[in-house]
C-alpha cells in the first residue's frame, strides 16, 4: 500500500463547494459549543444561585468583550440549529438533490446572518 | 478485503443507533433552546425571581434533565466523529476521548446539581 | 492558453512539482481538456495520464481540474477560467504524473459485493422487473467507477479504509434497491457499523463532482433510511 510516496491533498488547490463550507461550519460551531458548555453551566449556576450572582451575570452583558463572546455563542447556536435542521430534513428525504441542497445551504447562512443581527439588537 | 471497521469507542458501537440518537437529541436540544429564547423574550428584561421560578416548575426540571442528557449524548457522538476524523495516533486519540468523556460526566453532574438546587 | 500540470516521476523526481505548458486554443474552440493534454503530450511525451474512450464512458481520465475532480474528456476548456491547473485525483497515491493508484478504491467497491445475489430457484425465463421496480435503480446503475466522487470526499480522506466512500455506497444502494436481489437484509446488516456508511456528513462533494450527474449523497441517505425502517 505504501509503495507510492505522494498524494495530492493540498487544500489550497481544492475548490470547496458551498455545501461543503456549510458542513465544515456546522462542525466548527459544534466544537465551539462543546468547548463553551462549562461557561454556560457556570452562567446558569451563578445566575440562579443568588440575586448577587444574577447581577454579576448581568454585568457581564455590559462588558463589551464578554458580551461579544456571548453573541458569538448565540450565533454558533443559531447556525448549528439551522444547519442541523437542514440535515434532518435531508435525512428524511427533503431537498436531497444538488440544487435544493445549495439553496438550503445558502438559506442556512442567510438565516444565521439575520438572527445574528436580531440577537445583536436584543443584546445591546 | 479491507478490515471490518472497529467502533473506536463510539456511543453505541453501532452506526445506525448513534445516528438516530444524534437526530433525536438534536430535536430535543432545538426545542429547549427555542423555549429558553422565547421565555427570555417574553420576560425581557429578565430578573432573578422570574428566572429562578422558571426552573422551579417540575416540568421544567424534567425537561432540563432530559435536555442535559441529550446534550451529553449529542456532544459525544459529534465530538467522537471529529476526533476519529483527525486524530490518528491511537493512544493520543483514546486519551483525548477519555478526557472528553470525563468532562461530559462532570458537566452532567454539575448540571443536575444546579437544577436540583432550584426545586 | 496556459496549463499548469502536476508532474512526478518517481524514478527522477524527489517530489512532485507543477510544470507550465502553453497550448494554442482558438477562442471559439469546443475542445475538451483531454485534447489539450494530448497536444501537450505531443510536445512532451514524458507526461503520463490515463484515457481511453474519450467520451465519458470508461472513467479513466478522472483528474482534478481547477480544483474540482472531473473527467478530462467531458470538461470543455471554454467552461474553465485560465490558467488551467491539472492535478491528480485528490488523496489517491500518485504512481506518476496524473496516474493514481486505484487499489483501495476497488477494495472498497468489492466490500459492498457489487453483484446480484439471489438464492431463489433459477426461473426458466428472465427474472422480470416491473417498470416501477426498474425505476428504483434509475441513476444508480450508471456509475462508471471513475473515483471522482470518493476522491473528493473528506470523509474518505480521513478514513479511507473504514468509510466505503460515495462510489462504493452508490453501488451498495443499487443492489439494495434492485427487486431481483434477495440479500438486502445482509447487505444492510454489513453496513451498520459506525464508519462504513455513517461517516458520511452529507456535504454533497460527491454529487457536485459526479461527471455522470448521479447523486451518491442521496443514495447514502437512502441506505440509512432503509436501515432505520428495518430497525424500527
Image (cartoon, coloured by chain):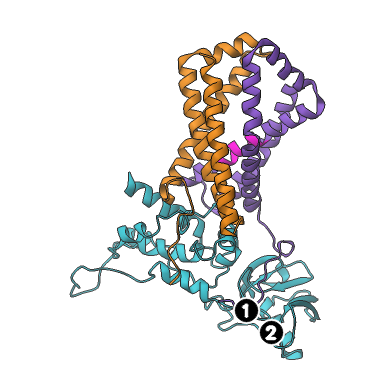
Region rendered in magenta: A76-85
Nearer to us in this view, C87 or A33: A33
Looking at the rendered structure, the secondary structure element under dot 2 is loop
Residue bearing the label numbered 1: A4
Quadrant for residue C111, please give it: bottom left
Query: For the stretch drawn in magenta, what is the main secondary structure?
Result: helix
> What's the colour of chain B in the image?
orange
The subunit carrying tag 2 is C
Asked if the residue under mark 2 is in contact with the one under mark 1, i.e. CB atoms within 8 Å, the reply is yes
Q: Residue at x 47, y 69 (%)?
A: C108
Locate residue C179 relative to residue C23 in the image: left or right: left
Which one of the lettered chains is coloured cyan?
A: C
Nearer to us in this view, A70 or A106: A70
A78 is within the stretch colored magenta? yes
Residue C49 x %, y %: 64, 82
> What's the colour of chain A in the image?
purple
Q: Around disc 1, counting alpha carbons within 10 Å, would you say few (fewer than 14), some (14 to 19), or many (20 or more)?
A: some
Residue bearing the label numbered 2: C10
Amino acid at each position: 500500500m505504501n509503495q507510492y510516496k505522494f498524494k495530492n491533498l493540498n487544500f489550497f488547490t481544492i475548490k470547496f463547494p458551498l455545501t461543503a463550507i456549510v458542513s465544515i461550519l456546522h462542525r466548527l460551531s459544534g466544537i465551539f459549543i462543546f468547548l463553551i458548555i462549562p461557561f454556560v453551566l457556570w452562567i446558569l449556576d451563578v445566575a440562579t444561585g443568588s440575586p448577587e450572582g444574577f447581577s454579576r451575570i448581568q454585568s457581564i452583558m455590559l462588558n463589551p468583550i464578554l458580551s461579544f463572546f456571548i453573541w458569538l455563542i448565540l450565533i454558533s447556536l443559531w447556525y448549528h440549529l439551522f444547519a442541523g435542521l437542514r440535515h434532518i430534513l435531508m435525512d428524511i428525504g427533503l431537498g436531497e438533490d444538488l440544487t435544493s441542497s445549495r439553496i438550503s445551504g445558502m438559506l442556512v447562512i442567510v438565516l444565521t446572518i439575520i438572527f445574528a443581527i436580531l440577537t445583536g439588537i436584543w443584546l445591546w | 478485503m479491507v478490515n471490518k471497521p472497529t467502533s473506536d469507542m463510539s456511543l453505541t458501537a453501532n452506526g445506525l443507533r448513534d445516528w438516530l440518537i444524534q437526530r433525536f437529541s438534536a430535536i430535543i436540544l432545538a426545542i429547549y433552546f427555542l423555549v429558553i429564547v422565547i421565555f427570555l423574550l417574553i420576560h425581557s428584561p429578565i430578573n432573578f425571581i422570574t428566572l429562578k421560578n422558571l426552573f422551579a416548575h417540575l416540568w421544567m426540571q424534567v425537561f432540563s434533565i432530559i435536555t442535559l442528557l441529550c446534550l451529553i449524548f449529542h456532544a459525544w457522538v459529534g465530538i467522537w466523529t471529529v476526533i476519529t476524523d483527525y486524530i490518528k495516533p491511537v493512544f493520543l486519540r483514546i486519551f483525548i476521548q477519555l478526557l472528553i468523556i470525563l468532562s461530559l460526566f462532570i458537566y452532567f453532574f454539575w448540571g443536575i446539581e444546579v437544577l436540583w438546587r432550584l426545586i | 492558453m496556459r496549463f499548469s500540470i502536476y508532474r512526478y516521476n518517481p524514478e527522477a523526481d524527489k517530489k512532485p512539482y507543477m510544470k507550465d505548458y502553453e497550448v494554442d486554443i482558438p477562442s471559439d474552440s469546443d475542445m475538451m481538456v483531454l485534447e489539450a493534454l494530448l497536444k501537450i503530450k505531443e510536445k512532451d511525451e514524458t507526461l503520463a495520464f490515463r484515457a481511453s474512450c474519450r467520451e465519458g464512458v470508461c472513467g479513466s481520465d478522472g483528474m482534478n481540474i481547477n480544483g474540482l475532480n472531473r473527467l478530462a474528456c467531458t470538461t470543455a476548456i471554454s467552461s474553465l477560467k485560465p490558467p488551467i491547473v491539472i492535478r491528480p485525483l485528490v488523496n489517491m497515491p500518485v504512481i506518476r504524473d496524473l496516474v493514481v493508484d486505484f487499489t483501495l478504491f476497488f477494495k472498497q467497491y468489492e466490500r459492498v459485493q457489487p453483484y446480484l445475489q439471489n438464492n431463489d430457484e433459477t426461473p426458466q425465463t428472465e427474472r422480470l422487473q416491473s417498470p416501477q421496480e426498474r425505476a428504483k435503480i434509475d441513476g444508480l446503475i450508471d456509475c462508471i467507477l471513475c473515483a471522482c466522487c470518493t476522491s473528493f470526499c473528506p470523509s474518505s480522506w480521513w478514513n479511507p479504509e473504514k468509510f466505503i466512500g460515495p462510489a462504493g455506497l452508490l453501488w451498495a444502494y443499487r443492489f439494495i434497491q434492485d427487486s431481483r436481489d434477495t440479500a438486502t437484509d445482509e447487505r444492510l446488516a454489513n453496513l451498520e457499523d459506525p464508519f462504513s456508511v455513517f461517516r458520511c456528513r452529507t456535504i454533497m462533494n460527491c454529487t457536485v463532482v459526479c461527471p455522470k450527474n448521479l447523486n451518491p449523497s442521496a443514495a447514502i441517505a437512502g441506505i440509512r433510511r432503509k436501515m432505520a425502517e428495518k430497525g424500527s
